Each structure stands twice: as structure tokens, then as C-alpha cells.
Image: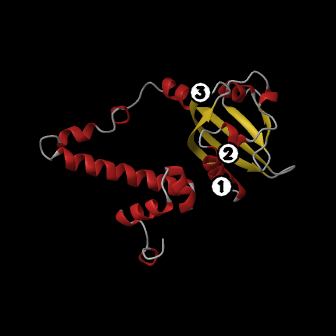
């Protein structure tokens, strides 16, 4: 496991780091495991409590986390986009195993990106001249907002308070957007 190509960290159930491999240390810009062991994982996550809350909730419910996109803060203060997968290990004592993949390196390695991934808005250029720019931009913003809300709700297992925090919204603002996009049940529209 020490030579695993992605970084990994083992924590207790409160998030205190117990072990890390060399790749994990390299991702965080460390030269020795003593620089991270004993610290809380939340300290290294850019969105700290928000990301830890999502990860911890899933793992405590024995749900594996797959491809959770976030950023880590390195020892030098730089930020690095990463993808985290995690599982709860029940034996010999409950622990969480986090596998951390450097997304910058992964994207550089996958140079054969399809055209739609390289420019996801290419289809919008075909609307120019057919529709006013105000309509094109408005619909695009609505689509992106809806996708972000759906992703946050999925990541937080429909915990709206956590989803709102993750999106940088107040809970009230999230409920307004949920209503606007028709994403709440009739019974919920009166009680945010």
C-alpha cells in the first residue's frame, strides 16, 4: 500500500490522520508523515468543515464515497484540485480510508479529450443570431445552477443545509432556487 500510485490517508472516525503514504505526502507538499499525522483532515481541505461534513456523513452511514471533487491546501498554502474516494474500515477498529487523486495530473495525462469536453458550450454558438444573447445567457445560467444544486444534493444525500453551505448559499436562497426549478414537493413549498 505504501507504493500505491494515488495518495491515501487513514483517519479515525473524528478525522484525525493516523497514517499517510508517500504520494499523499507529496500531494500535500510534505517531507515527513509527522507533518500531518495527528492533525485533523479538515485542516487540509480547502472547504474544511463543509467537505468534512459531506465525507463524514457518508462514511458514518457506511456509504462509500466515489470521485468527490474538492481541493486540498498544501503545506505551502497552494491549492490543488483533487478527487477523493473513501470507505469506512470496520476492523480492527473503525477507521476511514481516503484515496486522493491529483486532478491536474490526471487531466494532463488524459490529453485525448473529446471536443464536447474541451468546449462544453460549443452548441451555444449555434444559437447566436437566432436568439437574443440575454435569453441564451439566462437559460445557460439556469441550467448550470440546477446542475450544481442537483450535484450538491446528491453529494450531501439530500441534506439541504449542507448543500446550501457547499454552494455558498443561505438555506432560504437554496429553497427559493429549489422552488424556481420545481425541485421541491408541493408539501414542502410552504415550509422551507
Asked whether residue 98 appears in the rendered view, the answer is: no
- For disc 1, the neighbor class at 10 Å (few under 14, some 14 to 19, many from 20) is some
Identify residue for label 1. 58
Quarter of the figure with residue 149: bottom left
For the N terminus, the quadrant is top right
Q: Nearer the viewer, mark 3 or mark 2?
A: 3
Decide if residue 79 is on the left or right side of residue 142. right
Viewer-closest of 80 and 107: 80
Q: What element carries label 3?
A: loop
Which mark is first along the chain, 3 or 1?
A: 1
Residue 172: x percent and y percent?
46, 63
Name the mark on residue 78. 3
Which mark is first along the chain, 1 or 2?
A: 1
Query: Label 3 vs label 2: CA separation?
Result: 23 Å
Which mark is first along the chain, 2 or 3?
A: 3
- For disc 3, the neighbor class at 10 Å (few under 14, some 14 to 19, many from 20) is few
Amino acid at each position: 500500500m505504501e507504493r500505491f500510485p494515488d495518495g491515501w490517508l487513514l483517519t479515525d472516525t473524528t478525522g484525525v490522520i493516523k497514517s499517510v503514504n508517500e504520494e499523499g505526502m507529496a500531494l500535500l507538499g510534505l517531507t515527513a508523515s509527522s507533518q500531518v499525522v495527528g492533525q485533523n483532515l479538515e485542516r487540509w481541505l480547502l472547504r474544511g468543515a463543509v467537505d468534512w461534513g459531506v465525507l463524514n456523513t457518508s462514511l458514518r452511514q457506511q456509504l462509500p464515497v466515489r470521485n468527490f471533487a474538492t481541493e486540498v491546501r498544501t503545506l505551502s498554502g497552494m491549492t490543488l484540485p483533487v478527487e477523493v474516494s473513501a470507505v469506512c474500515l470496520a476492523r480492527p477498529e473503525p477507521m476511514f480510508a481516503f484515496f486522493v487523486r491529483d486532478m491536474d495530473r490526471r487531466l494532463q495525462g488524459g490529453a485525448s479529450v473529446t471536443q464536447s469536453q474541451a468546449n462544453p458550450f460549443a452548441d451555444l454558438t449555434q444559437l447566436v443570431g437566432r436568439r437574443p444573447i440575454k435569453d441564451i445567457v439566462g437559460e445557460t445560467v439556469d441550467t448550470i445552477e440546477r446542475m450544481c444544486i442537483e450535484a450538491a444534493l446528491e453529494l450531501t444525500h439530500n441534506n439541504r443545509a449542507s448543500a446550501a453551505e457547499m454552494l455558498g448559499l443561505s438555506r432560504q436562497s437554496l429553497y427559493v432556487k429549489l422552488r424556481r426549478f420545481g425541485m421541491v414537493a408541493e408539501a414542502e413549498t410552504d415550509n422551507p
